[in-house]
Amino acid sequence: MTQPHDNWAEFYDFIYENSYGNLYNELTQKSIQFITQLNNVKNIFDFGCGTGRLAVPLAQNDYTVYAFDKSTGMLNEVKRKRDELNLKNLIIQGRNVDKLAGKIDLALAVFTVLNYIVTDSGMDETISLLAGVLTPNGRVFIDIPYDNFFLSATILNIQGNPTRKVWLNEIEDSGVYEYNETCSGNFNGIEFSYSEHLQIRHWKEAELLEKFNKAGFTKQVNLTKNFPRVNSSYYILEKEN
C-alpha cells in the first residue's frame, strides 16, 4: 500500500532544505543538541523517521537507533545513508516492534509525524506502541503544531527550484484536513514532478497530552521555549514506572 511521501522520498531532503532554508537545518540541529544532553539514553526509537534526519546523526553520535516509517521510499533513503556511512548501529525497524518491548530509552515522534494519524483509535494504538517499547521511566519526545498552522488555507507557495504549493481543506469541521501538495524541480540534473493528497488531523494540544497521560505518561517537560522559530509546542513525556 502506497504511503505518504513514497513517490518523492528521493527528493525529500532537497525539497525541504530549499523550501525552509536555514530553519530546516536549525530545527534538526536543535533537536539533536537537546537529545544528546539527555541522561540515560542509549537506545532510541525514531517513529516516523522519514529520510533519517535525526536517525542518521544520532547514530553518528553512537546511539543505537531503530528507524521506523510506514513509507518504503523513506526507509530506502535511510538505508542508503546508513550503508554509505557504514552505520551498523542504525537499524531499519520493520512493522513488528514487539521485539523492542521494554528496550528503548527514548522514543521520537517529532516533525508533525503524529498529525498523520487521523482517528482516535489510531492515536491510542500509536501511543500504546510508543509506551510498549520504552523502558521503565522511558521518555518520548513529541511536537504538536499550533492551531494557526491549520488556519491558513495555503501553507506554502514558492517559485523556483523547487516550485511547490501546499494547501489544506478541512473536511466538514471535523478537525481532519485534506493535505494537498504539488511540486516540480530539478535535483542533480533529474527533472521531477509530483502531486500528493492525504489526510492529516489537527490534534489539540490538551487532547493529545491527555491521551498520553491516560497511557501512563504522567510527567511532562515543556520544551517549546527552546524552539522559538518553530510553529509547534515541544514536550518530553516520561512513562510512569
Image (cartoon, helix red, strand yellow):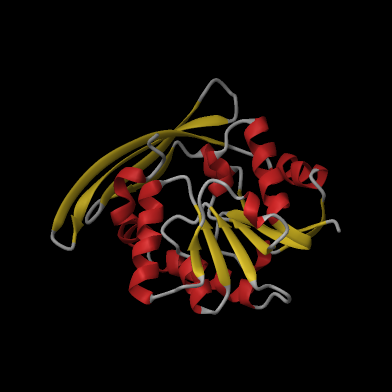
Q: Residue at x 37, y 42 (%)?
A: 166
Residue 224: name its quadrant: bottom right
Q: Is residue 127 left or right of residue 67?
A: right
Front in this rendered view, residue 87 or 206: 87
Q: Where's residue 201, x and y in %?
A: 57, 35
Q: Where's residue 96, x and y in %?
A: 57, 47
Q: Where's residue 214, x and y in %?
A: 82, 42
- Name the outermost residue toward the right: 241
* Residue 104, above or below 29: above
* Residue 3, above or below 72: above
- Name the outermost residue toward the top: 172
Q: Is residue 222 left or right of residue 11?
A: right
Q: Residue at x 73, y 61 (%)?
A: 139
Q: Is residue 3 visible?
A: yes
Q: Is residue 38 left or right of residue 95?
A: right
Q: Residue at x 41, y 69 (%)?
A: 22
Front in this rendered view, residue 186 or 159: 186
